[in-house]
Image (spheres, grey):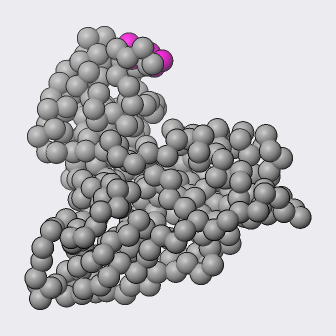
Amino acid sequence: MSLSLPVPSGAQVLITWPGRRISETVHALTDQGADVTVVTMNTTDAATLDALADLDGRRLITLVDEVHITDFDVVLRDPLTAAPEAPVEASAPHVGRVTLVGGGPGSVDLLTVGGLRAIREADVLVCDRLAPLSALNEARPDAEVIHVGKIPRGAFTPQETINDVLVKHALAGRHVVRLKGGDNYVFGRGGEEWNACVAHGIRVEVIPGVTSAVAVPALAGIPLTHRGLTQGFVVVSGHVGPGDERNDANWAALAQSGLTIVILMGVAALAEISETLIAHGMDPATPAACIADGAMPSQRSARATLADIASVAADEDLTPPAITVVGDVVTALEI
């Protein structure tokens, strides 16, 4: 599979008849600096509509019902359509292998050389929505692409299903690349995928990725450590709030740590997290920042005090994926 859509930077591009792989098309265009609009007329497939809503929510596209094609520099029908999944043999003369590739925060510029090589060699690519999907341009024309995204409040592929997909194709003798955003082992559930494959006698290789926990603050002008301000940082999941019975982070200890706190997946619980840190002794005036869609053309951020960051982020309509940084390093650089 290869998608080549050379367009000039700044071009106004209209996509008609989007398919289930519309995210790949959009990433290929936005990486070239295009401004992408998608017309949804006649689109009824639920998975495609979920993908479009996700792209629109991340401000990577503009969704419209009707358009005048003369308003655009380039008009094209989505060149990628989801072919039916190829039948997979129950067994093969040899067992294949799985490569877990961390793709970085989303920009193809932050994909490693090793990750790119794996994409080029893959028989099957199993991809997340936050992976650098424009890198699929480098895949072999005969490579099968399977999207297993987990869209907030939208299409959701259970982890067990993803594990089964990896195992099934590898047992059929294929080289399967699991392409994720960030790093597989930083809230990426890569360890579960490793164990599922090893349990079936499948060889697994890991190609680490640039984690968004470090890269996104850097792209927003925030160093996680800075001499004289802090001697370390901690990365914590905000997927559930401090008061949730599923939470196992010691927020009281974090508040007293003196370290930069990096919160992933914490948009919904940000107000509760801020209140908890303050309740356990963190200065309400501590600088904080929230960065959405880091490394993507739609990257945007807001800065405020710890006491105000949740309300400011909401006012700025910062939606997942977003990262919050709390600590004096937020104001360390002159910008």
238 lies above or below 138:
above
Screen quadrant of the N terminus: bottom right
Q: Position of residue 69 (x, y in %)?
A: 15, 85
Question: Exactly how many numbered labels are in the figure?
Answer: 0
Q: Which residues are magenta?
A: 248-253
Q: State the residue in front, 71 or 310.
A: 71
Q: Is residue 252 magenta?
A: yes
Instruction: Quadrant for residue 228, please give it.
Output: top left
Answer yes or no: is residue 298 visible: no
Q: Is residue 257 magenta?
A: no
**Left or right of 63 in this view: 82:** right
**Where does residue 61 sit, x and y in percent of width and height?**
24, 66
Q: Residue at x 45, y 19 (%)?
A: 246
Q: Can you tell which quarter of the image residue 299 is in?
A: bottom left
Q: Is residue 189 left or right of residue 332?
A: right
* Residue at (58, 65) in percent of width and height: 85
Determine if residue 163 is in view.
yes
Left/right placement of residue 56 relative to residue 31 reads left
Name the foreground residue: 263 vs 127: 127
The residue at 74%/46% (across/down) is: 197
